[in-house]
Image (cartoon, rainbow, N blue to C red):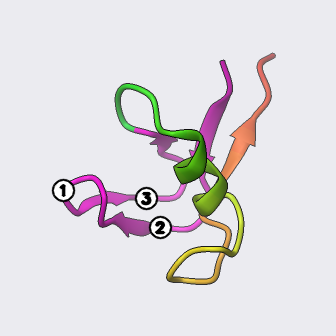
Amino acid sequence: MAKYRVVKAFTDLQDENHVYRVGDKFPRSGRAKKERIEELSSKDNKRKEVLIEEVEDK
């Protein structure tokens, strides 16, 4: 299972306005839908910025 980290702080409008800060894991609990991951890891979102990135397991 892939893991994701926040690279730009944002307020998640689909998660009760939870504020994610740089370095936080995403999602904060459970699993996010593939479409949501794709949206936040690209510029295809309201902010037009990459907000999360995949973290490689060590």
Residue furthest toward the left?
Answer: 16
Residue 39, given in percent of the width and then of the height, sits at 60, 61
Image height of 26 relative to 19, above or below: above
Residue 13, given in percent of the width and then of the height, sits at 30, 66
Badge 3 or badge 1: first in the primary sequence: 1
Q: Nearer the viewer, mark 2 or mark 1?
A: 1
Residue 18, given in percent of the width and then of the height, sits at 26, 56
Please report contact status of discs 2 and 1: CB closer than 8 Å, yes or no. Answer: no
Q: In whole angstroms, how far apart are the C-alphas of marks 2 and 1?
A: 15 Å
Q: Which residues are magenta?
A: 1-27
Badge 2 or badge 1: first in the primary sequence: 2
> Residue at coordinates 50% horizontally, 39% vertically from top-left?
33
In the image, residue 24 lies in the stretch drawn in magenta: yes
In the image, residue 31 lies in the stretch drawn in magenta: no
Quadrant where the image shows the N terminus = top right
Indicate which disc residue 9 carries. Answer: 2
Secondary structure of the residue carrying tag 3 is: loop
Say whether residue 50 is left or right of residue 40: right
> Residue at coordinates 62% horizontally, 39% vertically from top-left?
4
Residue furthest toward the front?
Answer: 35
The amino acid marked with disc number 3 is Arg
> Residue at coordinates 37% horizontally, 25% vertically from top-left?
30
Image height of 50 relative to 28, above or below: below
Residue 58, given in percent of the width and then of the height, sits at 81, 16
* Residue pointed to by mark 1: 16
Badge 2 or badge 3: first in the primary sequence: 2
Secondary structure of the residue carrying tag 1 is: loop
* Residue pointed to by mark 3: 21
Q: In whole angstroms, how far apart are the C-alphas of marks 2 and 3?
A: 4 Å
The amino acid marked with disc number 1 is Glu
